[in-house]
Amino acid sequence: MDAASMITRNDLPIAQRMRAVFELKQLATEAAVDAICDGIRDESVLLAHECCYGLGQLMNPRALPALRNALSDTSLHPVVRHEAAEAIGAIGDPSDRDFIAQFVDDPAVEVSETCRIALDLFAERDANQSTAQPDVGASERVRRWSEELLDTRLPLFERYKAMFALRDDGSPAAVAALCKSFADRSSALFRHEVAYVLGQLQDPLSRDALLAVLQDSSEHEMVRHEAAEALGAIADSDALGVLRTHLDDSDQIVKQSCEVALDLYEYWNADRETAA
């Protein structure tokens, strides 16, 4: 069975279908883009959101009609619409600025905030900003980025730039600042991006903070789902144990994220054992 046909097969395990999305993203052909677009309206919020995310990474304008339709469709889950908006911003067609602007006051705050960030991204591209940073020591840079990350008076776009700078630094102090920012209750979108960045870093120093997020049933599902995926990337025994306890989580996107995280861990470790 080819990857394109797997995406829309609801009878298959979610982990198998998610691997199909990853495979198609690697192919990056026009046919692969079309197949990923077909998954945007899947009943699995996790898979639909991953399809939008993958299309944003591919940055192929061929996906724009499907992504615009997804953002416009208020019957879709806000997590899917948010990811569609983010993908449109990543592709960066200048004609989409006015389209994105229509949703800055969307009732779904996840969508509204994402569209505001996308507009800021368009503006920065237009300005072709390349602001020179003062020549300061590494610890001073981390301190400044940490302050900007936690400053709720700043636009989310500026706080995101500080977040990505801390990710690229990757020091223990940077990881600690990122973990500390989970305490900011002003934006679930912001906290979900923090969890995503920590998953990229795969630093065990963030494990306890991510475990606390996943285990907090009052936290937004999009934040908990990203925390689950990040824990799957860290994949130590404590993280894997907690992921297994959430395989019956009441939030579908969290439950499926745990399934996928454990599947990927087993998949990659099977490859390592075979290689050995």
Image: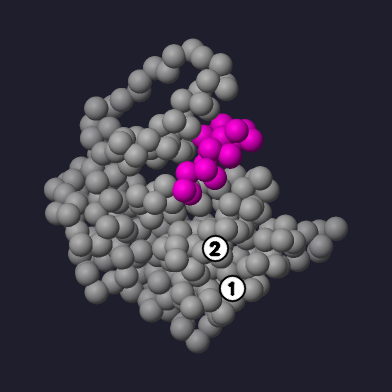
- x then y, percent, for residue 46: 45, 69
| Residue found at x 56% / y 16% | 137
Q: Residues within 10 Å of mark 1 (few under 14, many from 20)?
A: some
Q: Residues within 10 Å of mark 2 (few under 14, many from 20)?
A: many
| Residue found at x 17% / y 54% | 105
Answer whether residue 5 is visible to the viewer in this image.
Answer: no
Q: Is residue 66 above or below residue 156?
A: below
Q: Residue 214, which numbered label?
A: 2
Task: Indicate the amino acid at tag 2.
Answer: Leu
Report the magenta stretch's main SS. Answer: helix
| 136 relative to 74 in the view: left or right | right
Answer whether residue 185 is visible to the viewer in this image.
Answer: yes
Q: Residue 246, which numbered label?
A: 1
Q: Is residue 273 above or below residue 95?
A: below
Q: Is residue 184 above or below residue 78?
A: above
| Residue found at x 27% / y 32% | 124
In the rendered image, the quadrant that contains the C terminus is bottom right
Work out how far the residue at label 2 is from the one at label 1, CA to CA, in angstroms.
9 Å
In the rendered image, the quadrant that contains the N terminus is bottom right
- x then y, percent, for residue 72: 20, 64
Who is closer to the viewer here, 104 or 211? 211
Q: Which residues are magenta?
A: 166-183
- x then y, percent, for residue 136: 51, 14
Is the C-beta separation of discs 2 and 1 under 8 Å?
A: yes
- x then y, percent, for residue 208: 63, 53
Q: Which residue is farthest right? A: 276
